[in-house]
Image (tube, rainbow, N blue to C red):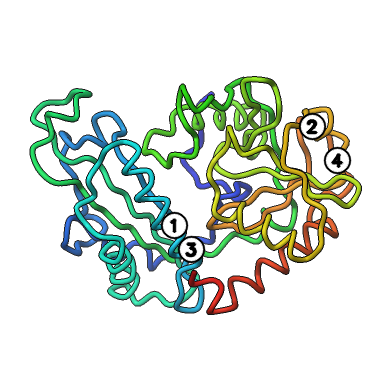
Amino acid sequence: MQLSPQASKTSSQAYQADDRNEKVLVYVNGEFVPRSEARVSVFDAGYVCGDGVWEGVRLVKGRVVSFDAHVDRLFEGANVIAMDIGLSKQEVKDVILKTFEVNKMQDGAHARLMVTRGVKKTPNQDPRFILGKATVVCVAEHKVVDAEAKKRGLTLHTSTIRCSTPDVFDLRLNSHSRLNFIQALIQAINVGADEALMLDTNGFVSSCNSTNFFVVRDGALWTSSGRYCFNGITRATILRLAREAGIAVREGDYTLAEVYAADEAFVTGTLGGITPVSAIDGRKLPGAGMGPLTERLADLYQQYIAAPQKAAA
């Protein structure tokens, strides 16, 4: 099946089109260049074999949401793959803030900071063939979540592609390579769904292809154990907010059958916050769209990102 080149309006990553994005300046290794001129080498390790890590951050009313947590995760990932970013944590923050600043962004924006091991002498896997420093790129865009996905809810399809065990590939590492998740998403798109729901190697529900997954059953919030899913910062925030609000939380293994019998479901991510799920594998959920507990948690999250002293941490 040939995939459409048009942006999806019903993805958890769907956003409103904004012509200003065609003129943004992109940070590339210390310089800001027009979007149309932003380039990296074909010998770059990220292009050659996805050797690198990245972070996506959201700008709300002049503040980067959960800034410290995002930067900490970036450096943890770089350490895991023995890569020197070449910048301190504060310098990475400064790159992101400066990218927002030069593009005159104060609200409703999203930036993706990408770090690769750098340019290689020859296109191969061996990190010892790196010629110099890491490649650092930051792309900031005006991005506001498309209201259609929030209103109608996402449809999910359970993929045959499984989330890997940490000894095969630790999904908590925000690596450039996303081929397994892209394969899962293509399966979902080919059957008319918006996103892929993925199981772990034991057959329990893990996460979606680009977001963390939650269900609501009997007034309690359920999510996976976290061993086989993304180390989601929004996920962690929602779990903390739920517990602080006195909502029962269950982190552990659960089955697809238990998902089908859920009252509500939603996904979480940096750009979309909370996005409701309306159907899974063709089965409509009773709380299709924004169910009562999903709506309550969405309100709590909005309060969190609106509070300067909280969202900045």
**Residue 184 x/y as whole percent:** 56, 28
Residue position for label 2: 282
- The residue under label 3 is which amino acid type? Lys
Q: Earlier in the sequence, mark 4 or mark 2?
A: 4
Q: Position of residue 227 (x, y in %)?
A: 59, 34
Label placed on residue 143:
3
**Foreground residue among 222 and 108:** 222
Q: Residue at x 44, y 29 (%)?
A: 179
Q: Amino acid at mark 1?
A: His
Residue drawn at (66%, 74%), measured in percent from left and top? 303
Height in image: 73 above or below 207? below
Q: State the CA–CA distance, disc 3 to disc 2.
A: 30 Å
Report the Cα–Cα distance between label 4 and label 2: 14 Å
**Disc ID at residue 262:** 4
How many other residues sit within 10 Å of disc 4, few (<14), some (14-19) or many (≥20)? some
Measuring 79% from the left and 32% from the top, which residue is drawn there? 282
Give residue 308's position: percent from left, percent from top: 53, 79
Please name the residue shown 47% across and 23% down the image: 167
Q: CA distance from mark 1 to mark 3?
A: 18 Å
Out of 156 and 211, give the one closest to the viewer: 211
Q: Are marks 1 and 3 in contact (CB under 8 Å)?
A: no
- Give how far apart the Cα atoms at labels 2 and 1 are: 35 Å
Q: CA distance from mark 1 to mark 4?
A: 31 Å
Q: Which mark is residue 70?
A: 1
